[in-house]
Structures are given as C-alpha cells and as structure tokens.
Image (spheres, grey):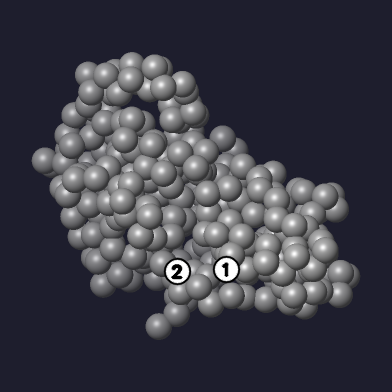
Amino acid sequence: MARRRISRAVAVLPALALVAAVAGCGSDGGEAKGVPLVREGQLTTCTNPPYEPFESNKDGEIVGFDMDLVDLVAEDLGVPQEVTTAPFESIQSGQALNVGNCDIAASAITITDVREKNFDFSEPYFEATQALLVPKDSGVEELEQLEGKTVGYQKGTTGEQYAREHAEPMGITVKQYADLGLLLPALENGQIDAVISDDFVLRDYEKKNSDFAVVQEFDTGEVYGFGVKTGNDKLRNKINEVLARAKEDGTYDRLYEKWFGTAPPE
C-alpha cells in the first residue's frame, strides 16, 4: 500500500481550532468492512519520526517497522494507509486520536496505565526497555558516573520517566527535547553528555554512528501497542486479528528481520 506524509497533526492547534477540526473530521469520515474511519477511503496513522527503525522519513515517505505492520491492517480493510506526523506528546496523551486526526497511533508507544486512560491499546506487538547512550570516548559505563553532568530524553516518553525517577536523584541534570531528531544531535554537539531512550532505537543509532555506544540497559519490561480512540473496539479488534495472523504465518518475523536485521526473540 502506498504511503505519503500529510500535514502535521491538528493536535498542535489552539483549542478553538481543535473544535473546528473535530467537526470537520466528522463530515468526511467513512468506514471499511464495518470499521469506522476518520477519513473516507483511507486508514490514517499518527506517528512521530524520526524514531528508527520504527518510523523515519525517507525521500518524503514515512517508513519503518510500525508503518509496515499498520500496512497489513490497511490491506485487510482494503484501503491505503496515509501517515500524518504529530508531536509525541499529542500522540501519547491521546489528543491526536481524540480530535479525529487519525485512526491509529503508531509510534513505538509503550503501554502504560496512564496512557490506557487516554486511549485504547491493541495487544502488545514488541518488547523493549530503556538504555543509556554516550560518546564512546567518554569513559562512562553506567548511569551513576554521570553525576554533575546532563542526560537528555524525549518529552512524554518512558525515557523521561526513567530519567526523572532514577537519574535526577543521583545529581544528574535532565533535559528534555521534543523529538529524537533534536535529542541525538544535542549529544553529537556536546550539549548533553548522554541520552536515555528505548534500547532498540539507540542500538540502531549505535550501528550507524561508531563514535557512540550503548553502555547500559535498564530492565523496565516495556511492551509497545498501537493506539485507537477509546471505545473503537472494531478497529482495535481488527488490529489484534491482523497482528495474530502475521505472527502465525511468518509475516511478522519477515518484517522484524527487515528492520532489525535479526529474527525476533523467542
């Protein structure tokens, strides 16, 4: 299915504009195979690139593991997937879904109790944890060695939660960034001394940037899920059905190997 990047999410607009946006979305909605859609003839996805290998912008197209999995849902419904970008904060808070900007939130979203109050999750499709990335020549091997230094994280993520709960009490300054596209360059430019983020994302960065290394992982036991607006059981059930079939017929394994270069864990 073809994908294209469309306009930045309406979730960043002022409150009055959001009311108008909701009304507008309701007027051009539709359905596919009994599943309600915010826009006629397409399955609309909200995501927050760059977050390789889950989502990134390549030649004007949003691609990645998440996008390929959602493509399977779109194919089952017989419509194309269209992707819109949004700040991660508006995605994880449920705002992007609630204003009718998209049908699915797909952005390597860890399932948490707080987020489950904001929107409904699919069954988990990926296991993750947090990790620490530093310059390879820094001499840092663990979080405790960063006392008096600065660790960056992406706003609204479980990396922020870990940094605030564990790094800050150690006397480490924590600093937030809107997205990974700002966070990692800050490390490269020496504005911060380390980054806390999801392990697979930092491992992917490490492979492509030999001057940096993941030196520590933190066992947070996280799992990712796709988000839908609260009460949209028809779409949530469809996502679960497609994910289960993909794991049974080997499609999930094939896509995992495509994006991570290895077979998924048992």
Identity, as a three-letter code, of the amino acid under mark 2: Glu
**175 lies above or below 161:** above
Quarter of the figure that contains the N terminus: top left
- Please provide percent x and percent y for residue 236: 22, 52
**258 lies above or below 83:** below
Disc 1 target residue: 130
**199 lies above or below 187:** below
- Tell me what residue is drawn at x 69 percent, y 44 percent: 182
Identity, as a three-letter code, of the amino acid under mark 1: Gln
Disc 2 target residue: 222
Name the residue nearer the viewer: 137 or 60.
137
Residue 199 circle label: none
Query: Disc 1 on helix, strand or loop?
Result: strand
Density class for disc 1 (Cα within 10 Å; few <14, some 14-19, many ≥20) is: many
Image-quadrant location for residue 244: bottom left
- Please provide percent x and percent y for residue 213: 75, 70
- Please provide percent x and percent y for residue 192: 79, 54
Quarter of the figure that contains the C terminus: bottom left
- Please provide percent x and percent y for residue 81: 35, 40
Q: Is there any visible trace of residue 61 in the rendered image?
A: no
**265 lies above or below 232:** below
Precedes in sequence: disc 2 or disc 1: 1
- Tell me what residue is drawn at x 20 percent, y 60 percent: 241
